[in-house]
Amino acid sequence: MSIKSDNPEHGLQFPGTFEICAMGAAGAGLETRVPAALEAAGLVVHRDRHRSRPSARGNWVSITYAFDAGSRAEYELAHAALRALPEVKWTL
């Protein structure tokens, strides 16, 4: 059995608007640090399109923002910019 897409264009399509999620300790200020780091990297952040979710015990938080990427390189730049922050433990 093989899995095959009916549409070879599936996958990330550029340019586009994507979401990126950063996770770190609650109280680390990720709500402001995430969009600031993305903008400092030269990316357009949709500050009105964000959400946050605390962990069950409240020790961790995930912050998600939408941003524009014109190429795969810009998409990867977003992850690199957030992973460079010491407060960010993971990105998705």
Image (cartoon, rainbow, N blue to C red):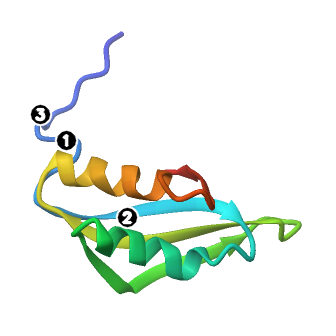
Real-space CA distance between mark 1 and mark 3, rounded to the nearest whole angstrom: 5 Å
In the displayed structure image, the side of residue 81 where residue 5 appears, left or right: left
- Give the labeled residue for mark 3: 8
Query: As shown in the figure, which amino acid type bears the numbered disc 3?
Result: Pro
Q: Nearer the viewer, residue 35 or 51?
A: 35
Label 2: how many Cα within 10 Å (few below 14, some 14–19, many 20+): some
Disc 2 residue type (three-letter):
Glu
- Seen at 15% across and 51% down, the residue is 13
Would residue 6 appear left or right of 61 to someone viewing this image? Answer: left
Inter-mark Cα distance, 3 to 2: 22 Å
Tag count in the figure? 3
The numbered mark, 3 or 2, whose residue comes first in the sequence reads 3
Picture quadrant of residue 38: bottom left
**Label 3: element kind:** loop
Q: Element type at marker 2?
A: strand
Amino acid at pointer 1: His
Q: For the residues labelled 3 and 2, say whether their Cβ atoms are less than 8 Å apart.
A: no
Does 57 sit above or below residue 31? above
Mark 2–mark 1 Cα distance, whole angstroms, equals: 17 Å
Residue found 30% across the figure and 77% down from its top: 45
The residue to which callout 2 is attached is 19
Q: Are marks 1 and 3 in contact (CB under 8 Å)?
A: yes
Image position, residue 63 (x, y; %): 56, 70
- Quadrant containing the N terminus in the rendered view: top left
Secondary structure beneath dot 1 equals loop
Mark with earlier residue (2, 1): 1
Apparent side of residue 68 relative to residue 8 in the rendered image (left or right): right
- The vertical placement of 30 against 76, above or below, is below
Say the numbered circle drawn on residue 10. 1
Looking at the image, which is closer to me, 20 or 86? 86
